[in-house]
Amino acid sequence: MTTFVLVPGAWLGSWAWQHVVDALQEHGHTTLTLTLTGLAERAEEGGPQTNLDTHITDITDFVEKNDLHDVTLVAHSYAAAPVTGAAGRLGDRLERVVYVDSAPFAAGMRMLDLMPPEAADQLSRQVAAHGDGCRLPMPPLEILGLSNSLDGLDEDQRSVLSARATPHPFGTYTQRLTGPVEPGPGVDRVLVACSDFQGLLDGGVAMLDFLNHAPWRRFDLSTGHWPMLSAPADLANILHTAVS
């Protein structure tokens, strides 16, 4: 059986993984989750100083302080950035890395690089103009629903997502990834692609083509961007299959 460490994406905490945890434990796996600094029950721990390095340290400290070995580290969405950094630092504690509707970051890359420059500038101005100037609120569901990201979520699940989301530390979007980013030799690499991401992978996007080839193993899941909420049993089955 496998030791899973599940890392939630932007605006989320450990709570988002609960149904996946239950399903993986039914398969007999040890399944742990962590909430990153500044989010959910750890919201008050965040501040202007919270950045990508903070979240990388969250993950590496969690694995090391719990003396975990043969870990399967799972990243959802934004968590791809700190998980990439942690994977390069965990050495032989790491057996496998799984990116759920996300992909590993290259050295020198930052979250804002994933959007057009004008959109990144607008986002920075929005954060500076509202609240404490260092946190990014989750977009309204009306905006998220313009893509397929909410597919599979019923009204109750959408309400839970909206109500429990917490503003995300913006320093994690602006800081570039530094330090080692490649996991150790022999670390298994897995991709779980949801509906929109499948279109990108199959659409000939050059920067993503490497994910369609060895050593990557790809699993497709026909649901929106939050599969731990919209299809937790299916996601757990994919994770179980990937480690079996």
Image (cartoon, rainbow, N blue to C red):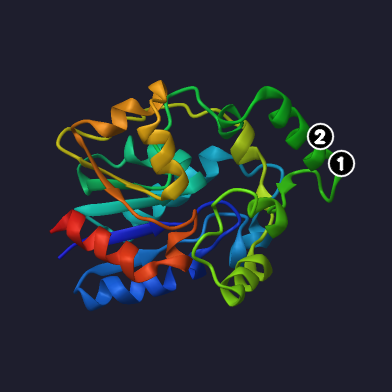
Tell me the quadrant of the picture where the N terminus can be found.
Answer: bottom left
Using residue 80 as the reference point, say whether residue 46 is left or right of it: right
Secondary structure under the numbered disc 1 in the rendered image: helix
Under circle 2, the secondary element is helix
- Label 1 CA crowd tier, 10 Å (few <14, some 14–19, many 20+): few
Where residue 186 appears, as percent x and y from the top left, is 14, 37
Q: What amino acid does circle 1 point to?
A: Ala
The quadrant of the rendering that contains the C terminus is bottom left
Q: Which mark is residue 7?
A: none
Is 149 on the left-hand or right-hand side of 43? left
Q: Three-letter amino acid code at disc 2?
A: Arg
Residue at the (53%, 55%) spot, across then down: 36
Judge from the rendering whether residue 72 lies leftward or rightward of residue 51; answer left or right.
left
Q: Residue at x 59, y 40 (%)?
A: 172
Near-viewer residue (106 or 44): 106
Q: Residue at x 26, y 59 (%)?
A: 239
The residue lying furthest to the right in this view is: 129
Q: Is residue 220 visible?
A: yes
Point out residue 189 in the picture as x, y percentages from the top left corner: 24, 41
Give percent across and percent down for residue 24. Answer: 27, 70
Q: In the rendered structure, are the residues bearing label 1 and label 2 in contact, judged by CB atoms less than 8 Å apart?
A: yes
**Residue 217, quarter of picture:** top left
The alpha-carbon separation of the residues under discs 1 and 2 comes to 6 Å
Task: Specify whether residue 140 is in view.
Answer: no
Residue nearest the viewer, comparing 16 with 45: 16
Drawn side of residue 199 relative to residue 145, left or right: left
Residue designated by label 2 = 125
Residue identifier under label 1: 129
